[in-house]
Image (tube, rainbow, N blue to C red):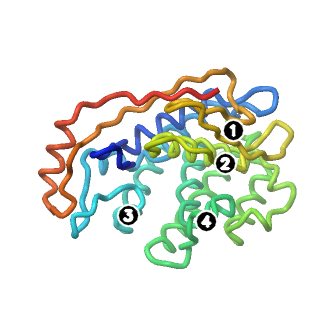
């Protein structure tokens, strides 16, 4: 859950709904300055379902032992590893390339975003993430090898092999070879991180404030930082805009639960309040 304090209540957005918003952003990505996703359907699938493992967990809100609401940042480690593993497997069963990207996203969440999301700590040598990352990075190499002989062969060349080798060894883009840093797989990873962060920003903001998001991949094999400038309570200007249309209208379902007792440890009361709240669409406009 993405939980935001709004007024005298709390707004809840599920991770799958946040993912659907990220997928919509990916589907509209691309113009003269920004390349369209390629392979398009696989990248959009990964963007939409990069948090697929949360589906069952987010069927209800959760409390910690002290009554604190559990949002997506404070889920127990073992539970996180378990449901992310299942989610990656589910996406990979639909599309191998999307599964590869989803796995890279998940491991990056505990490896500092491979150097592009510095707010994320590197926990690659801490249990249970150490074994999770090792297993997933092996999974990534295996999927890439399989992709070389199929319809995604043009997206699974030597640059991609070098990319994974360097990332897995160093954990950071700073030490990538130039060919690896320019690979389509790396650029798709950057695109996924950009729409993920932008969706999180929209879903988790009680009031929109100016921010910078990036690095986002551009059409010239470079990257750009996207400046997000509020123009109103639900409208932002994106400079430069990576989207194929302007304005771009997007929305996400949310429930707002008033007057929660944060000292209570009763989850059944919380679940009743959550499902008793009307689900409404929160709308945004990106110019």
- Label 4 sits on residue: 112
- Residue 268 disc label: none
Tell me the element at label 1: loop
Front one among 272 and 220: 272
For the image, the number of numbered tags is 4
Q: In terms of sequence position, does the residue under pointer 2 or pointer 1 come before the other?
A: 1
Mark 2 vs mark 3: in front: 2
State the image coordinates of residue 237 (x, y, percent, origin top left). Answer: 65, 32
User: What residue sits 64% from the left and 38% below the top?
Assistant: 229
> Would you place residue 206 above or below residue 252 in this image?
below
| Marks 1 & 3, CB-CB < 8 Å contact | no
Numbered badge on residue 74 = 3
Quadrant including the C terminus? top right
Q: Which residue is disc 2 drawn over?
A: 212
Compared across the picture, whether 71 is left or right of 96 comes to left
Cβ atoms under marks 2 and 3 closer than 8 Å = no
Label 2 packing within 10 angstroms: few (<14), some (14-19), many (20+): few
- Residue carrying label 1: 152
Viewer-proximal residue among 46 and 231: 231
């Amino acid at each position: 859950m993405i939980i935001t304090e709004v007024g005298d209540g709390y707004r809840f957005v599920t991770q799958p709904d946040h993912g659907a918003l990220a997928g919509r952003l990916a589907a509209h990505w691309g113009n003269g300055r920004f390349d369209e996703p390629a392979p398009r359907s696989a990248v959009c699938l990964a963007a939409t379902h990069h948090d697929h493992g949360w589906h069952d967990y987010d069927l209800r809100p959760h409390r910690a032992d002290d009554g604190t609401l559990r949002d997506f940042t404070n889920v127990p480690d073992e539970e996180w590893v378990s449901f992310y593993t299942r989610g990656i497997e589910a996406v990979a069963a639909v599309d191998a390339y999307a599964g590869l990207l989803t796995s890279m996203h998940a491991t990056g969440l505990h490896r500092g975003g491979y150097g592009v999301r510095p707010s994320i700590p590197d926990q690659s040598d801490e249990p249970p993430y150490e074994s999770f990352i090792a297993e997933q990075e092996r999974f990534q190499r295996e999927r890439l090898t399989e992709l070389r002989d199929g319809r995604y062969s043009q997206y699974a060349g030597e640059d991609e092999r070098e990319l994974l080798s360097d990332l897995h060894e160093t954990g950071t883009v700073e030490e990538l070879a130039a060919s690896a840093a320019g690979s389509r797989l790396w650029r798709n990873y950057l695109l996924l991180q950009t729409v993920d962060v932008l969706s999180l920003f929209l879903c988790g903001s009680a009031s929109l404030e100016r921010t910078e998001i990036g690095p986002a991949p551009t059409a010239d094999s470079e990257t750009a930082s996207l400046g997000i400038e509020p123009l109103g309570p639900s409208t932002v200007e994106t400079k430069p805009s990576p989207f194929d249309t302007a304005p771009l209208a997007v929305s996400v379902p949310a429930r707002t639960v008033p007057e929660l007792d944060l000292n209570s440890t009763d989850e059944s009361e919380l679940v009743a309040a959550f499902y008793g709240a009307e689900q409404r669409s929160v709308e945004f406009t990106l110019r």
